[in-house]
Image (cartoon, coloured by chain):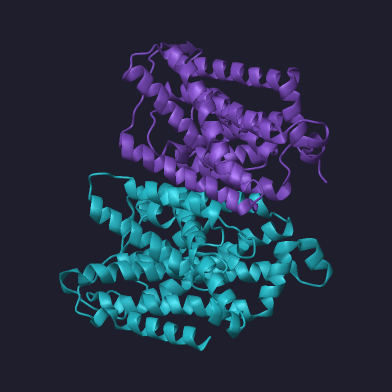
Amino acid sequence: MIDPIFILEAVVNGILLGGVLALLALGLNLIFGVIDIVWIAYVDLVALCMYAVYFLVALYGWPLWLAGVGSIGVGALLGVLVHLLIITPILSSPPINQLLATGGLLFFIQSVATLLWSTDHRSLRVDLPTIELGGIFISFTRLLAFGLSILAMTALYLFLKRTYTGTAIRAVSQDREAIALMGARPQRLYLVTSAVGGAMAGVAGALLIIQYAVHPYFGGAFGPLTFMICVLGGLGNMVGAFFAAFIMAQIISVGGVMVSTEMGYVIAFVVFIVLMFVRPGGIFAKRG
Amino acid sequence: MTALRVVGLVALAAIVLVPFLPLGAAQEYIWHVIIQIFLWSLVGNAWSLMGRFGLVSLGHGAFLGVGAYATVLFWNFFGMTPWLGATLAVLLTVAFALVVAYPCSRFQVVGHYFGLVTLAVGEVIRLLIVAERDWTGGSLGVSLKTVSTASDWWTLQFADKRVFYYVGMAAWLFGLWVWWRVDRSMARSAMEAIGEDETAAASVGIRVTRFKMGITALSAALTALGGALLALYLAYANPDTLSGIGVSLRIVFAVVLGGMYSLLGPFVGTALTIALSEYLRIYFGIKLIGIAETIYGLLLIIFIIFLPAGIYGSIADALRRRLTRSPAVVART
């Protein structure tokens, strides 16, 4: 029998993991919901931002917080580049081709990273004290990352709800024909969305590099999970993705402690597959 | 079209004769590359059976993995001859594919969603292989137990690569034949209608679920056959080379590169990608690890943007247009 304290610790760690997964899923889901294209390579863009932070700190001696701000800029730039170079030419192609084009980007990013930076694992582990709370050990670094990711998500929420551009972006995701009639230019909104989605990747990259080591295949570790969270929450449904991230994180974290790390993921994926059959519109969709 | 038929027969004769050409010291290596092209083309062909009708699976690595691992494990643990082991592996894969495909079809999981569900299925299989490391060898992979005799039809282990050359070629031609039969059948029209609009297809009396399950079973069976033969040929199976997302995407890319709507498209795409990566690997050696994949990824993006019908598909279309024009027009050009 597993000591309940370990389970409790797994639950707490799951909540912390959920914060990071939610941040990853929100950026992807924004692009998904607005432009209706799955960026298979989204988490690989996050990995590039992690490399950016790593090199800014380790090579150029920037303070960590400044490198983090730099990462947001790098992410936004990458988002714009991906949109202009890859997405724009295939906006009206069949979905399979769009999926494959960003899949090609995934191979490209992973191999360029291998080529330039080798397969070494690089990390900027920030060693902050561990907090003990009633027998549970919580890493302060992860707690900090959790807090910052909640902050970033709140900022995204306010941007979408309170600003004019944010309102326009939400309008595109609801009806892309009507928005053109209302005098907004979808093309420009797509670009803004890609930049914001990219910036979210930058935030995620900065928060991930202080917890995990980055390597060229980092995207493969979190990528599939991130799509699944988006789909579970409902494509384009931000609140849904937020909760789905915490549900998946709990399954992985608690399942990992109770059975084994791999089985934690297996259970999470099986839950995803079954939920796709039962509730194809996501767990929060009304049944049609 | 007789000219094309002659070209085809000459090409086939050349392929049959390759093992007997004097290729010098590199001959074993050349055979090795061609065997891989045959087997991966078979898998690509199997994928395109579904892919061309809009059933874009990102989880064919799962079928490949089940086929390969079942064959190897049946032999290693039960001493079951691959003749029986591979047959069981194919049946097992088909059963597994149907378990996944039935709810997908019932609940109308299509498009992006189908891709993501199959992606998850592929990951589940890969992770299960890694997790069950006591008998699958985990992420280190598993080797096929070798027997003392050099060549043996009972264990399908041969010292001479040429045997596998012809086995691979036969499997590849069998895959082409299946593809061609499907292309000529009623199932093709039915599946195309389903791919266009499922509800409309159902309303004119097409049995959507039955056709989808049939094509999935066929595709999974051929993929598992490819996986079993790859594992037997390499005498080794690894979760990263025979299962998982990387492999699944590679299969899709080779097919898209060649052209998924044409008979030889998957072969052309597979041959090109394998030849390219082998060439770059020899050319750069271990100096620039990743360069082959970089060029590969870049080519994929460019192809999907500019040549969505694939290399072979585009050339075949252009040729067909030329050939069907009236002789007078052809003479003038």
**Can you see residue B50?**
yes
Q: Is residue A120 above or below residue B193?
A: above
> What count of labels does the image hold?
0
Give the camera-side residue of A8 and B83.
Answer: B83
* Residue at x 59% of width, y 74% of height: B321
Q: Is residue A277 above or below residue B60?
A: above
Q: Which x, y percent locates residue B150?
A: 20, 76
Give the camera-side residue of B4 and B300.
Answer: B4
**Can you see residue B125?**
no
* Displayed quadrant of residue A218: top left
Q: Which x, y percent locates residue A143?
A: 51, 16
Q: Which x, y percent locates residue B127?
A: 46, 48
* Displayed quadrant of residue B103: bottom right
Give the camera-side residue of B196 and A193.
Answer: A193
Q: Is residue A146 above or below residue B158?
A: above
Chain A pictured colour: purple
Q: Residue furthest left?
A: B25
Q: Residue furthest front?
A: B332
Q: Which x, y percent locates residue A178?
A: 82, 37
* Residue at x 46% of width, y 11% of height: A131
Chain B pictured colour: cyan
* Residue at x 56% of width, y 30% of height: A24
Q: Is residue A17 above or below residue B246?
A: above
